[in-house]
Amino acid sequence: MATRSRARRLLPLLTFVALGMVLGSLLQLAFFRRLDDHSHTGHFDNDQEAADLRLGYVKPEVISWKPRIIVFHNFLSSEECDYLREIARPRLEISTVVDVATGKGVKSDVRTSSGMFVNSEERKFPVIKAIEKRISVFSQIPVENGELIQVLRY
């Protein structure tokens, strides 16, 4: 009996919260559209910029705040993955471990990956530039402060 009473009191509150969330989202959308109409520009310099960022496709999922772990689903398109595989394939090298005695990299039966880094010439390619820009926007780190893209195959 007590649970029914609580449920009856909670139902209007939950309905109010849900409607508030929906209305709030619609008002935000209307506000952004009005801004676009008045400025005669979108949020980005051009449609290509929005396409490069894969807006609407990338879905962040927070795994943990401490330490900060966020999975970005659909961060790369299938075409971008194929492109990276193609430029990486001829230059993949077996990953190494550090030899404690010499401090040099040596092959190991434990490591199963092979990898390569995108070079400075490849960084000029439009696909690579788009990926680096997306990394910059989502990580909030300028492209020039980022590291080279590394492709690993396991």
Image: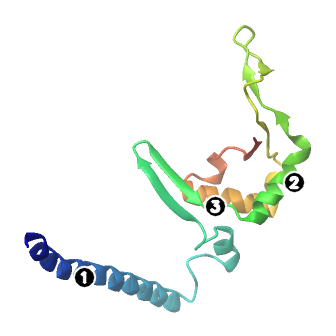
Do the residues bearing badges 1 and 2 touch, measured as CB atoms within 8 Å?
Answer: no
Relative to 131, is 125 on the left or the right?
right
Q: Position of residue 96 (x, y in %)?
A: 77, 26
Q: How many C-alpha atoms fall within 10 Å of the one at disc 1: few (<14), some, or many (≥20)?
A: few
Which amino acid does the dot numbered 3 rest on? Phe
Which amino acid does the dot numbered 2 rest on? Glu
Relative to 19, is 101 on the left or the right?
right
Q: Position of residue 142 (x, y in %)?
A: 60, 53
Helix, strand, or loop for circle 1? helix
Q: Where is residue 57 in the image (x, y as percent from the top left)?
A: 61, 70
Residue in the picture at 77% in, 21% down: 105
Relative to 62, is 113 on the left or the right?
right
Image quarter (top left, top right, bottom left or bottom right) of the C terminus: top right
Helix, strand, or loop for circle 2? helix
Of the residues under marks 1 and 2, which one precedes in the sequence? Answer: 1
Residue in the picture at 89% in, 41% down: 91
Q: In this view, which residue lies farthest toward the front?
A: 1
Do the residues bearing badges 1 and 3 touch, measured as CB atoms within 8 Å?
Answer: no
Residue marked by disc 1: 15
In the displayed structure, would residue 25 be above or below residue 129?
Answer: below
Residue marked by disc 2: 86
Q: In which image quadrant can residue 126 be found? A: bottom right
Q: In this view, which residue lies farthest toward the top?
A: 101
Residue marked by disc 3: 75
Of the residues under marks 2 and 3, which one precedes in the sequence? Answer: 3
Residue in the picture at 58% in, 85% down: 41
